[in-house]
Amino acid sequence: KQEVTQIPAALSVPEGENLVLNCSFTDSAIYNLQWFRQDPGKGLTSLLLIQSSQREQTSGRLNASLDKSSGRSTLYIAASQPGDSATYLCAAPAREAAGNKLTFGGGTRVLVKP
Amino acid sequence: DAGVIQSPRHEVTEMGQEVTLRCKPISGHDYLFWYRQTMMRGLELLIYFNNNVPIDDSGMPEDRFSAKMPNASFSTLKIQPSEPRDSAVYFCASSFSPQGGYGYTFGSGTRLTVV
């Protein structure tokens, strides 16, 4: 059974500082790993999807790395802005014969102070 | 494509009433997932479908919960009778491939309050 953990649960940084969000998973036989953003009272917005064959994926100020052997993924957000304040969730499926189910971490709640 | 569409956005109902949540997945996606989010338990998978067929409903909490997917463009999650502990945000998501190779797209959710 896949278990996904995100530490820390909450993070507060001043504007301009780089953010480092951690995600660990127990079943390394994953097809991919996905990072989402969730604003209060809103749905989930997909940020980055890293395939199992990739080591990292980049989109603008966001960079996500994947190390399957150690069961870890890290989301980096460069030069944080107040608009980056949200909860960030990582999710990993596990290889199953009949399709994949995403298992979510508990999320890291980020506050970027102006 | 308009993305995954859920309705209603908010639902307030009295305990004991039947509640039906609706989802329209992205056209061409052959996997559909229903998730529930609460502060205490985070995001939990309730059930998922492949090509309109329920594959795994082990996350459905009780027999009061049921889900159907009569066709590729529509799914419902029904709670009957509803209870206050069912209050949560219910999300629907769809995916293009079994491996989720193209990722998952979530709807905006239905916030259910049972009083």
Image (cartoon, rainbow, N blue to C red):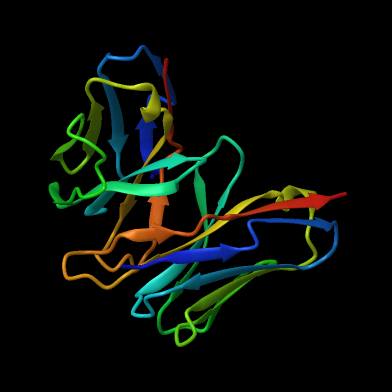
Residue sitting at 83 percent across and 65 percent down?
Answer: A17
Residue B71 drawn above or below residue B57: above
- Hey, which quadrant is residue B82 in on the image? top left
Residue A48 x, y percent position in the rendering? 52, 65
Q: Is residue B27 among the parts visible in the rendering?
A: no
Judged left or right of residue A60, residue A37 is left
Residue A64 drawn above or below residue A99: below
Looking at the image, the residue that sits furthest to the bottom is A69
Residue A57 drawn above or below residue B19: below
- Hey, which quadrant is residue B101 in on the image? bottom left
Quarter the C terminus of chain B occupies: top left
Residue A55 drawn above or below residue B28: below
Residue sitting at 14 percent across and 39 percent down?
Answer: B71
Residue sitting at 54 percent across and 38 percent down?
Answer: A42
Judged left or right of residue A37, residue B4 is left
Q: Is residue A78 among the parts visible in the rendering?
A: yes
